[in-house]
Amino acid sequence: MPVLPAPPWTQFCDLPIHLFLSCGAPGRGWYSRHSMADDEVLREYRTGSDPRTLRDALGCFATGVTVVTCFDENGGPVGFTANSFTSVSLDPPLLLVNVHKHAACAAGLTNAQHFAVNVLQTGQQPASIRFSTRQEDRFGANDWSRGEFGAPVLQESLGVFECERYAVHDGGDHHILVGHVVKASFNPELDPLLYFRGRYRRLHFD
């Protein structure tokens, strides 16, 4: 992922990606060519430690980037950038995303009957940034339409999962939103937008 200026990422914006993948300066991490026992190389989190260290540790897990969308109770489209997304089950087909309880769209997403998970491709980095800020009109600059099952779908995404709300669970400072996949579409010719150690990345093939 190309290097970006550090945006105002906090969990009180709408972006779980900020909690999990703000992993500090490049080249510093858990491993090096030297011994892992070297205190100057190995960083460690324990209960009661600085939460930033835990965020840095979690940031060592590379992920894709998604924009999760729905229509709120007023009929307006809402959404946020998230990397806290995973498959849960194939039978039934379930997935989950984590939504911070203080996110502006938290109520809309946890109450909506349908939502969509838009998996972003390399050309959609501007959309990822836009949906991770407090910008009022996140959808205006994006090519989107109402999906077959009633949730906003970002055009030209790598993949789109249209879901019915299956369950909402408590997860500390997050809601765990589980969706039943009713439609999945994807373009096998596109490459994913990735996120690792606080930066956008792209696939590199040997």
Image (cartoon, rainbow, N blue to C red):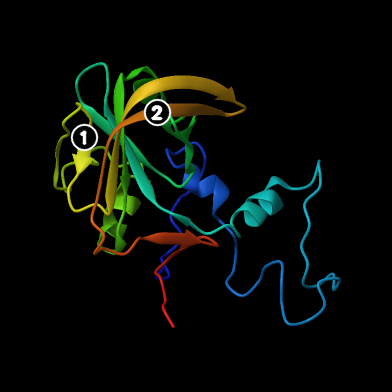
Q: Earlier in the sequence, mark 1 or mark 2?
A: 1
Of tags 1 and 2, the one toward the viewer is 2
Residue that appears at 78% across and 57% down = 44
- Picture mark count: 2
Q: In x, y percent, where is residue 158? A: 27, 54
The N terminus sits in image quarter: bottom left
Residue that appears at 45% across and 28% down = 178
Q: In screen coordinates, is 123 left or right of 92?
A: left
Q: In screen coordinates, is 102 left or right of 139?
A: right
Q: Name the residue under label 1.
A: 152
Q: Tell me which amino acid carries mark 1.
A: Pro
Dot 1: element? strand
Q: In x, y percent, where is residue 149? A: 20, 27
Residue that appears at 63% across and 50% down = 55
Q: Determine the CA span between mark 1 and mark 2.
A: 15 Å
Alpha-carbon neighbours of circle 2 within 10 Å: few (<14), some, or many (≥20)? many
Q: In x, y percent, where is residue 72? A: 27, 22
Labelled disc at residue 179: 2
Q: In screen coordinates, is 193 left or right of 76?
A: right
Q: In x, y percent, where is residue 43? A: 76, 62
Instruction: Kindly indicate the quadrant of the structure image that contains residue 173.
Output: top right
The C terminus sits in image quarter: bottom left
Q: Which of 14 and 190 is in front in this view?
A: 190
As displayed, is residue 92 above or below residue 19? Answer: above
